[in-house]
Amino acid sequence: MKKITFLLILLFTSLNIYSQSGGWQWSNPKPQGGYVQNMKMIDANNWYAMCDYGVMLKTSNAGVNWSAFSIGYQSTLYPGAGIYTNLLSGWFFDVNNFVLGTASSRGIVRSSNGGITFDTTQILATGSGSVYDFHFINAQTGYLCGTSTLKLQKTTNGGLNWVQVPNLGTTTLYSVYASDTNNIFLTSTSGNIYFTTNAGVNWTTSNVGTTSTLYDSKWINATTGYLCGSSGCFRYTTNGGANWQGTNPPTTGTMQRILVSGSTIYVGGFDQVNIYSTTDIGTTWNTIPFAASGQYSTFNIYSMDIVGSTILVGGTYGLMNKSTNAGANWVTATSHTTVANMVDVYASSGNGRVIAIGSNTGGLDACVYSTNGGTTWSRGTGAVPNNVLSDLSMRNSTTGYVVGRFGIFWKTTNGGVTWDTSRSSNSALTPYFCNGVDFVDDNTGWVTGGVSGPGGNTKIWKTTDGGINWVEQPQNYVGPVGVRIEFIDANTGYTVGVSQAQKTTNGGANWFFITTGLNTTSSYNSLVLTDANTAFTSNTNAQIFGTTDGGANWSNLNFPLTGIGTLFCTDWINANTGMVAGIFGTVGKTTNRGATWEISQTGGYTTMGVDMVHQDTAFAVCGNTFGGEIYKYIKALTGTITWNNETPSEYSLSQNYPNPFNPVTKIKFTLPKEGNVTLKIFDITGQEVKTLIDGLSFRSGTITYDFNGTELSSGVYFYSLFVDNNRIDTKKMVLVK
């Protein structure tokens, strides 16, 4: 009986991906990645940031160090895979207790331990839409508002359950303030505000004298409040919103956030490197540049907060800047400037050198390097701004090459400190999108690429003078761009692309197909060689294939998860030990050539590149439109799932063993056919306390989950199995500590 055992490291919604000692850790520079949508300064040292792709950041030392938490995982929109939803809003009762609002049907996540664990609640109205703002009157009673499907909703149990407040029609609401349960104030589009004095039985609609969208409001009491919005809108009231006064705006741009500190009011918004302050309710404004040295000429502010004289500003590209003297001086609240949409990474096993590259649109760092294993990073110089990079090939820790759009061919001889771009000019590669590169010595190398778009011809070029001159190589196929190329020596090399793989034994003079055993209906995105006969590749169908006979035959290594989509990259340190990674930050690791798999998630959106230093250490890069992430892997064993590939005859859920237990027990279930599996734990009141498996798509078989109940209190619990959203069975278990 063949068994496949794989480890699930912090994969699920209810677990913080960094609560353990190992696994994937968000590496400097940080924060990175998508927009900082909202932030909260609890005090001078304890700060939270809510970001795109389900990432929450936390610091307890005023931004010197940050921890990252992945909390937006869900599978309802894409069965068998995780989709990260943007975190847009939050309400913080103290440093440990808070609720966060998302941009999806997931709705609300809550934590009572500072983000170590989360529970999820579902908005009970129509169920989908973005949560833009919260306001709580006390620890139990509060309100949220959002898109037209959500409107205004109320909770009386600390955010566990929500009920829609009626009589508001169909409108999008951007901010909410409640002085008590009767008096509620809302901002909306077209300069409209809504307020009620009888808990929503009746609503009054008013216009503040503008057609601007009103994005944010701040109230210092029930009568005095301030608004900001699009087209430089700023308004204030001193009589509870009965009348509003407008002043000379500081800018014509969008004002996204407003802060009030004593008699000083701050506003900030889009396409700016300034925030604005006033001490006379907008009669005059002070312009406060917040960009640190070397940062951007334009920037979208999505979030601001203030404690005392410390101001924190965040937004585009994951950037956060802070001032500790009311805006007189600014420094980055990170250890480095933000990085581009990252696509590839290299890590040396000997000297701690790590190099990462990406698409550096918007003036982001396209080439960064570390000399201490990712603890700190520096910007590589010489890289031309606003270019799209695609592949990094390092011959050793000092010499390597980068290719990309419009014939980009860059070279470093000092481990990424500087990049020589001179060979990109007047090259045969210039008209083409270069997708892959590999060199076997200082002079001999190959590049793949072609004309972008469907039907574009794929080409292979060779140089024998270090990239000064390139000669197009013959090939046996025509197809869209999207191939990789790797050589083991000057003669033997492989290339993969759309539905195929090819090999040469004479340095690229001739190529022949090697597709036996491959799925020829998929496109192949990665390629790695460990010797002349051993190669691995991954495809768009969540498959990874390997060959041990020089490509004559390929075998499917049976990646355990189905429906996960594209596996973008793979790296192997020998014929048995490797990693494969792809969409939704999913990473698979094996030490026995695919007989068993360890499945984890980096916390990023899409893992575009992975590089193993050795069996227990690896680096990965993730990309999205607005920035990238760099992660470091440290071996950690936290829980196991064992999959037996014998096909049972029926669905079943067995009694956990041992029972009672302290703190580890086994939960076994069977699947007669492939299905999307959810495994949940509930307390004796029926409240969900943990999601162990959240919509993962498994092949048929017997699955055993090793559950660790360390985080739970002693008591009676129930666990339920769902397959394809149908409840299969529920069992009782007893935890005794």
Image (cartoon, grey):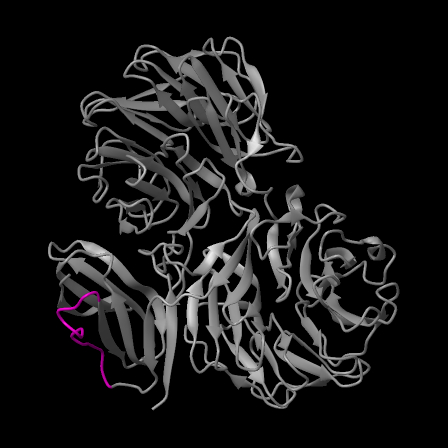
Quarter occupied by residue 508: bottom right
Q: From the viewer's side, name the closer residue of 620 and 516.
A: 620
Relative placement, left or right, of 663 versus 643 is left
Q: Is residue 383 above or below residue 146?
A: below
Quarter occupied by residue 9: bottom left
Q: Is residue 602 visible?
A: yes
Answer whether residue 655 is magenta in the image: yes
Looking at this view, name the residue that lies furthest to the front: 351
Answer whether residue 502 is magenta in the image: no
Q: Is residue 347 above or below residue 499?
A: above
Q: Is residue 563 visible?
A: no
Question: Magenta span: helix, strand or loop, mainly?
Answer: loop
Q: Which part of the image, by quadrant, shows the C terminus? A: bottom left
Image point 40% across, 50% down: which residue? 69
Residue 335 position in % (x across, y down): 56, 42
Residue 340 position in % (x across, y down): 61, 49
Residue 126 position in % (x across, y down): 28, 46
Q: Which part of the image, by quadrant, shows the N terminus? A: bottom left
Q: Is residue 254 above or below residue 632?
A: above
Residue 649 position in % (x across, y down): 24, 86
Relative placement, left or right, of 38 versus 695 is right
Q: From the viewer's side, name the closer residue of 575 and 215.
A: 575
Which range is magenta? 649-663
